[in-house]
Image (cartoon, grey):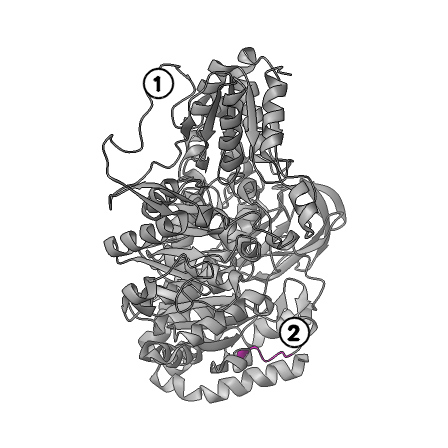
Amino acid sequence: MTEDSAVVEREKAAGAGAKSSETFSKEDYRRAYEDMLLIRRFEEKAGQLYGMGLIGGFCHLYIGQEAVVVGAQMAMQEGDQVITGYRDHGHMLATGMEPKGVMAELTGRSSGYSKGKGGSMHMFSVEKNFFGGHGIVGAQVSLGTGIAFSNRYRENGAVCLTYFGDGAANQGQVYESFNMAKLWSLPVVYMIENNKYGMGTSVARASSNTNLSQRGASFEIPGEQVDGMAVETVRAAVGRALAHARAGKGPYILEMLTYRYRGHSMSDPAKYRTRDEVNEYRQKHDPIDHVREILLSKHKVPEDDIKAIDKRVREEINAAAEFAQSEPEPDPAELWTDVVR
Amino acid sequence: MPTQILMPALSPTMEEGKLAKWLKSVGDAVAPGDVIAEIETDKATMEVEAVDEGTLGKILVAEGTEGVPVNQPIAVLLAEGESEADIDEAASGGGAKAPAKEEAPKAEASTGSVPDPSAEQRAKLPPPPAAPGGTEFPDDQPDEPDYPAGTEMRQMTVREALRDAMAEEMRRDEDVFLMGEEVAEYQGAYKVSQGLLDEFSARRVIDTPITEHGFTGVGVGAAFAGLKPIVEFMTFNFAMQAIDQIINSAAKTHYMSGGFIKCQIVFRGPNGAAARVAAQHSQDYAAWYAHVPGHRVIQPYSAADAKGLLKAAIRDPNPVIFLENEILYGHSFDVPVDDDFVLPIGKAKVERKGTDVTIVSFGIGMTYAMKAAEELAGMGISAEVINLRTLRPLDIDTVIRSVRKTNRCVTVEEAFPTCSISSEIGFQVMTHAFDFLDAPVMRITGKDVPMPYAANLEKLALPTVADVIDAVKAVTYTN
């Protein structure tokens, strides 16, 4: 897919979801703004701490893609589960996991969500129905299908939102999972976050058919492309997909057309794309600016109210960063624990 | 108070870099996410983005400067209402809003190569949890029988024992289910799941497509969500397609989650050589799985092993690799008549008492070991035969106690020799019974070649009873 046709696809998808903004209330926009901003500020802070040597290893930032997880979360019901790959900080914060616990895991401290043993790519919260956090590209697709299997086995009415990227969309086990999900009518929504690059390789250079929403066609799984930069459009699409899966009709694929502003991981020099391309998205399609503009112009929210949200979010993130640096490292005895039960 | 902007690290190993270019000038407004500078290392060029909002008050490191250490202040950012007058204080280090290097905990202070753990940390590290039985190897341990004397016994095949174990556990626990290729309508490729579909319905006995990687991931996901799957592989040779899910997802997630995610799942099926099926269908994976922490590995020999250990595996809260053998499926043994007959995981069994040599084996290797012991008895050599049963955790205690008594050890298995279970036994015996040994430990294994198809070559590739007898003669210096 060329640059231009990708934008056209995205805008076409946006057009289809135009009605969704009418059902998105002022309060919805306010909440979406705050939730997306929390992720943005968290990731900026994580990038800063990484730059200071306080976060090690791999650190994949979610900046630019915030509308996807926030919109999806707004459509979910209590009990629905989430599973994703390694670019997972945004998903965790969207499910309501504490920024403090996530940041402390990034710095490898005992108060982190995995007691410092998992790091950026491996965090979980049974309480928030977040099943990770997986470092092997595509593995979470089969795992998420298995969580959906458990929903059907127990007839609990829950749906598992299974996220993966445009890169993972080419993995073989994705199609093995699609087949079983449809064959057994499992309640799963596959959320393909197409941010245009699998590490440094563009979708067009890795995928014979770049319309990833149709990747379930041979299994008769319905799919659609969605403007992943518009939170109201995301919520509406995920709502439709969840209803489909919950009604026993089986899986549904949503391809979220989105964009990551930062490199694949912190140590990515990003030479595979131009600064102009990044700036185009930042300046014209930013999901947070989009919501901020609607709050100010359509809903006449005073600028001071927006600034108050900005301030509160910044304080929460600063507190998380301080917590993540002041908490102790795991006790040496933790080396031996949690290997087996 | 003005905020210092510090020289960032691009990677955990970066210690310094070149400040290649400033993209903002003093007096420019800066918003979070704005690119303010470019830095270079020998590996890459990266952009420095602002984290805080403000005005660029002062540039402390000019563009083109090489060798700028990570975390050195490179600029000062003024917040609303601050002026240049506030800068001196910030530049002197007093006003760093972002925690400066010296405030970072000691262990994190170096952004360079990974530091050795401090002596203090090493001193606080306790020894690893003891293996079952500990490391004292007292030689007066009473033998614990698998079942009380007088228990009613019934003869059955390994195949029937495995089926009964699954059926009993599925009756006992609604969360247990069986999935795999041909397990339901076909009644199992080797008829191990005979009758289960009729009793438990298609909801709990599930035929999967031929997609090992995918259905293994589905099983593991279901286990994360609290179900207790039994995943059958038609053979463990096919589980190589799924080994990423078995190791990276099932065995590691409990640890990686700090103990918050549980994965109660059994992976079972025939393992190792069958007959005349050539290299791709004949491998023994015992050593592969036993190598990895985070799960348990069991390889039963008798029907009683199969029943008692499979029931234990299904009840165990960890992933369990349960390695069966196609040839043993049809062998008959006595099994206690008891719906609650469960054997302990991690406990070896002394199958035959002896005094002159210890033969250590497991699974189908036990058939060679037992026949050899019988023939050796006729030659006046008393062999003690240990059936390991569990390969992780390995019951090394039972082996060491025996070797300290017999002073000689021979291992028997069908797998390849290199990095095998035999290798591990040899090492452990060397460590814990060095002074007790009267001869080097010997191993009888499959040959170090892919399994050939031709009948004569296949026989040559596998161990024989004669090989075991010859090894025992060698370690006992018998002609």
Q: Which mark is residue B407?
A: none
Quadrant where the image shows the C terminus of chain B: top right
- What segment carries the magenta color? A209-213
Q: What's the amino acid at mark 2?
A: Ser
Q: Residue at 41% across / 16% down in the picture? A: B136
Q: Residue at 29% across / 64% down in the picture? A: B200
Q: Locate residue B437: give its quadrant.
A: top right
Residue closer to the observer: B52 or B284: B284
Of the two numbered discs 2 and 1 in the rendering, the one whose residue sits closer to the viewer: 1
Residue closer to the observer: B130 or A189: B130
Q: Which residue is mark 1?
A: B141
Q: Secondary structure at mark 1?
A: loop
Q: What's the amino acid at mark 1?
A: Gln
Bin the neighbour count of mark 2 within 10 Å (Cα to Cα): few under 14, some 14-19, many 20 and up: some
**Is A210 colored magenta in this rendering?**
yes
Question: Please, which residue is most extreme toward the front here?
Answer: B378
Percent x, y for residue B83?
53, 52
Magenta span: chief secondary structure: loop
Residue closer to the observer: B6 or B312: B312
Percent x, y for residue B49?
60, 57
Q: Locate residue B388: give its quadrant.
A: top left
Q: Which residue is mark 2?
A: A207
The Cα–Cα distance between marks 2 and 1, rounded to whole angstroms, is 64 Å
Letter of the chain that mark 1 sits on in the rendering: B
Q: Is residue A298 above or below residue B227?
A: below
Q: Is residue A264 visible?
A: yes
Letter of the chain that mark 2 sits on in the rendering: A
Bin the neighbour count of mark 1 within 10 Å (Cα to Cα): few under 14, some 14-19, many 20 and up: few
Q: Secondary structure at mark 2?
A: loop
**Is B357 colored magenta in this rendering?**
no
Q: Residue at 62% across / 47% down in the picture? A: B8
